[in-house]
Amino acid sequence: MCAFPGIAGRTGNRLGVNLRNTAIKDGVAQVQIQFAESLTRADIGTLKTYLQNQGANSAVVNTGFVINPRLAESLDYLAGKGGSLFGGKVRTIDSEFKIFELTFDLLP
């Protein structure tokens, strides 16, 4: 979990993301959520802003196991249609275990 104060720290804690250990390589941030119960526009926005401030040009967010059935259904639908959630393209990583990937462009 993220153990530093501020809004990014609270967002990291809610998402189960250790923001201090988020790797940024060649401008791409790789974010691993342990398990997703909810993904809010505010949390994703904060995460995107934090990563941008750390020098990322794009972000790949792995949702981990989506434990909320409604969220999993929505992500599955969006992935099937080539859609996006809060500006991030949704892709299915593992349909059996309900794991998805969201890809965000962070350039201004």
Image (cartoon, rainbow, N blue to C red):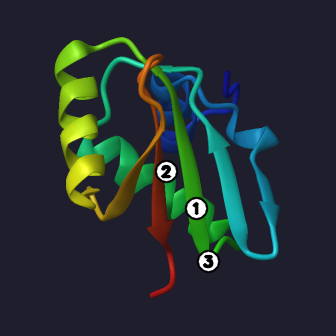
- Label 2, residues with CA under 10 Å away: few <14, some 14-19, many ≥20: many
- In the depicted structure, whether residue 16 falls above or below residue 78: above
Asked if the residues shown at circle 3 and circle 2 are in contact, with their CB atoms under 8 angstroms apart, the answer is: no
Q: Which mark is residue 47?
A: 2
Give me the C-alpha separation between circle 3 and circle 1: 7 Å
Q: Is residue 6 left or right of residue 32?
A: left
In this rendered view, identify the residue nearer to me: 11 or 86: 86
* Residue type beneath disc 3: Asn
Q: Residue at x 66, y 71 (%)?
A: 56
First along the sequence among labels 3 and 2: 2
Residue 89, image x and y in percent?
37, 61
In this rendered view, identify the residue nearer to me: 7 or 32: 32
Task: Name the element at disc 3.
Answer: loop
Q: Residue at x 37, y 60 (%)?
A: 88
* Residue type beneath disc 2: Leu
Task: Name the element at disc 1.
Answer: strand
The residue that label 3 is drawn on is 57
Residue 106, image x and y in percent?
50, 75
Residue 1 figure quarter: top right
* Residue type beneath disc 1: Ala
The residue that label 1 is drawn on is 59
Q: Residue at x 35, y 17 (%)?
A: 37
Give me the C-alpha separation between circle 2 and circle 1: 9 Å
Give me the C-alpha separation between circle 3 and circle 2: 13 Å
Q: Quadrant of the C terminus?
A: bottom left
Task: Name the element at disc 2.
Answer: helix
Of badges 3 and 2, nearer the viewer stands: 3
